[in-house]
Amino acid sequence: MNCTYHIQKQASSICKAPHKCQCQRKLCVECLYDHGVDIIKQTVSIDRFRTMVIKKLQESKLDETSEITSQRMNFKFIISKFEIIITFGKNQKNLQNKYMI
């Protein structure tokens, strides 16, 4: 992807600093120096940024998977409790019918 301001230059970094203005985040080498942020602390290469995004996405998917597993276990627990209650009710009716006769 090319720089918005320097069409002939390719964007090589992403700015991580919080922006209050309309500054661009994709920076070519020239924009990187003109941007006015701490280059070491506030910018990251596009490849490293891509890796960071993929890692965060995978972590969120793992969290979602564990949440789904937890909800599935809770659902199975509730279903088993209902089955016990229904079975108890049937047994109670059978006993009442047996001793009423």
Image: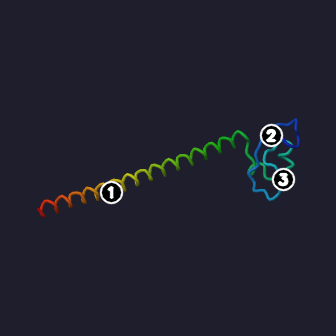
Q: Residues within 10 Å of mark 3 (few under 14, many from 20)?
A: few
Return the residue nearer the eye: 64 or 46: 64
Dot 2: what SS? Answer: loop
Query: What's the CA distance linking mark 3 and mark 1?
Result: 64 Å
Name the mark nearer the viewer: 2 or 3. 2
Dot 1: what SS? Answer: helix
Q: Amino acid at mark 1?
A: Phe
Q: Residue at x 45, y 53 (%)?
A: 71
Q: Amino acid at mark 2?
A: Ala
Query: What's the CA distance linking mark 1 and mark 2?
Result: 60 Å
Outermost residue toward the top? 8
> Is 93 on the left-hand or right-hand side of 23?
left
* Above/below status of 71 relative to 1: below
Tell me which label, 1 or 2, sits earlier in the chain.
2
> Is 93 on the left-hand or right-hand side of 74?
left
Name the mark nearer the viewer: 3 or 1. 1
Q: Which residue is mark 2?
A: 11
Give the total of numbered labels: 3
- Percent coordinates x, y for residue 82 in the rendering: 33, 57
Q: Which residue is mark 1?
A: 82
> Is 75 on the left-hand or right-hand side of 33?
left
- Percent coordinates x, y for residue 84 in the rendering: 28, 56
Q: Which residue is mark 3?
A: 36
Q: Are marks 2 and 3 in contact (CB under 8 Å)?
A: no
Return the residue nearer the eye: 44 or 21: 21
Q: Residue 23's mark? A: none
Q: Amino acid at mark 3?
A: Gly
Quadrant (top left/top right/bottom left/bottom right) for the N terminus: top right
> Is 87 on the left-hand or right-hand side of 60?
left
Residue 90 location, quadrant: bottom left
